[in-house]
Image (cartoon, grey):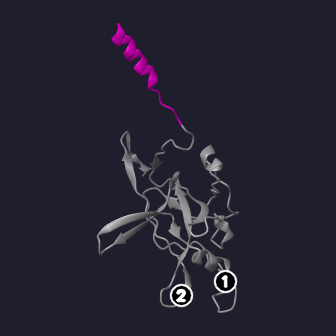
Amino acid sequence: MRSLIAAALLVQGVQGFYLPGVNPYSFSEGEAVKLKVNKMTSQKTLLPVDYYRLPFCQPEGGPKMDHENLGEFLAGDRIESSPYRINMKVDMYCEQLCISNLGRGEQKGVSPNKMVRAIRKNYHNNWIVDNIPAASKVEDDTTVTTRYWQGFPVGFIAKDTKRAYVHNHVNIEIQYHSVETDPDKGRIV
């Protein structure tokens, strides 16, 4: 009798729950996958900056706020739509997103533009795909290691000229696995 009561208590103590925005989504082949942008962050300044404060390409009709759950809102995330078009299991190559004026070039004695300041302060773009934060893959051939960084830098400073350059080409690689119950669908991992 005691083991029956203990087993009943144990069964009652195990319950599942659902957090909004955390439930996995299964994508069909060709289905649109949203790439969203979040505030940019820097380890140098610790002050987040809204993604669209810099002259990045904007979605048609302008960016829209895109909070999916309460946690994102409470964390102060500034999640907005982006102009990137991604479709599940569809390879795309060399798509031009837009042409943007980044401001004046670097000149001695002239205050740098917003983009150059962001690069010099080591700001990183933070993108989100299917509620998963994007990461940069960094491979080191000498030690044969692969590391992942949260987000990716807006640009870099050339070692020889000390000038700022924008990372204006991105290679987006999305990994997924097939759904056990429906092999025609995939879940982003």
Type of secondary structure dominating the magenta stretch: helix
Q: Judge whether residue 39 is colored magenta.
A: no
For the point 64% across and 58% down, the residue is: 80
Which class describes the residues within 10 Å of circle 2: few (<14), some (14-19), or many (20+)?
few
- Front residue of 115 and 88: 115
For the point 66% across and 80% down, the residue is: 101
Q: Which mark is residue 112?
A: 1
Q: Secondary structure at mark 1?
A: loop
Q: Are marks 1 and 2 in contact (CB under 8 Å)?
A: no
For the point 64% across and 87% down, the residue is: 105
Q: Quadrant of the N terminus?
A: top left
Residue 135 seen in the figure: yes
Q: Position of residue 104 (x, y in %)?
A: 67, 86
Q: Which mark is residue 162?
A: 2
The three-letter code of the residue at mark 1 reads Pro
Q: Is residue 119 above or below residue 184?
A: below
- Front residue of 147 and 167: 147
* Highlighted range, magenta: 1-18
Q: Position of residue 45 (x, y in %)?
A: 61, 68
